[in-house]
Image (spheres, rainbow, N blue to C red):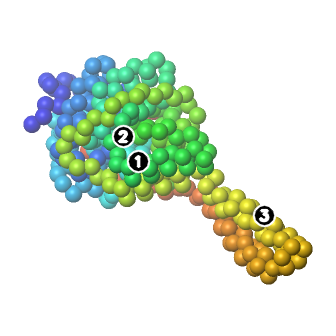
Amino acid sequence: MVNLAGPMKQISETFISQPEISVCIACRNEEANAPAIAAAVIAEMERVDAVFDIIFIDNDSSDRTVATIKDMCSRDPRIKLIVNTRNFGQMRSPTHAIYEAGGSAVISMCADFQDSPALLPEFVRRWRSGVPLVLGVRKNEKNGPILRFFRNLSYSLHRRFGEYPVIPNATGFGIYDRKVVEALRRLNEPEPFVRGMLVETGYKLETIPFDRPVRKKGKSNNNFFTLLDFALNGLAGSSKGLLRAPLYVAFFLGLLTFFSLIGAALSPLWDGSWQFWLFAAVLEGQFTLMFLFFGLLGVQVALVSERTRNQPLVIERERVNFPKDYRSHLAQQ
């Protein structure tokens, strides 16, 4: 049995309901890592003398993750648990925990030790010094050539079409001031790409490079297709300009159509093959109209998205260790 906090301290209702810092840990099938990550987080947070809680959010685990965390909750009221009714994906579930946290600052991390708990004291130190947003940035990514290519392509597309920059190798692991969390909530994204949304808020941001730790136990839930889906959702969520890309294609095809018509008109002067030029103009004109239609449709989709984003990120099955007045103090801040 992992000793979560050493000798148990007397923890008041105020301690539970009004933490200075909430540490949100997303998990799925992490029964091997959950006790160890909780112990590591508690050890680091007690070093900075912080009033804190830990919120695990379980995304439909099929192993004993929920039972393991419930056992920890029964022994330490600082540990809380949200259990989703199903798997809501790796973007929505962690974000829901961030929104439900009661801390004046929120730390977001994963349960599998790919986010280093050793950075937590430095996160807290910088936040207390007045920095509203601090992110950990991995210095090393152990990927194969194919995954590396698609990762670099994703960053390139973000730079080209995104409306705000995305920090390479920043996963969202970091500390967010309460005002940053509330700004994220007001964006009301149905598929929240948090690492991009954090930059979108415009708050001052600092980064801390770190070596990516080796996963201690278990197997990652991510594979090529889940990472590809994450990248595509992130690109779509952070770039409305991408929806207008067909309009740019239509513009260039329209130019080609114009030049082909000129070629058809002038072809008798040099070779007389006006039929070829006319056929090219007709074909290019058809593609121009098609991409113009797709571009206008994309703009309409963007407008509809802006006006109708109002759905819950997850549906909860149960909560553990959340008192009734949890987060109530935030209304007074």
- Name which residue lies at 48% across and 55% down: 232
Splitting the image into 4 quarters, where does residue 47 fall? Answer: top left
Q: SS at mark 1?
A: helix
Are dots 2 and 1 in contact, CB under 8 Å?
A: yes
Amino acid type at mark 2: Glu
Q: Which is nearer the N-term, disc 2 or disc 1?
A: 2
**Label 3 belongs to which residue?**
255
Residue drawn at point x = 88 percent, y = 77 percent: 268
**Circle 1 residue:** 148
Which percent across, then down, holds residue 46? Answer: 26, 22
- Does 143 sit above or below residue 48? below
The image position of residue 2, as x and y in percent, is 12, 34
Q: Is residue 183 above or below residue 129?
A: below
Dot 3: what SS? Answer: helix
Q: Nearer the viewer, residue 281 or 227?
A: 281
Return the residue at label 2: 141
Numbered badge on residue 42:
none
* Image quarter hosting the N terminus: top left
For image coordinates 58% across by 34% down, the residue present is 202
- Tell me if I can see residue 19 in this picture: no
Of 206 and 59, which appears nearest the observer? Answer: 206
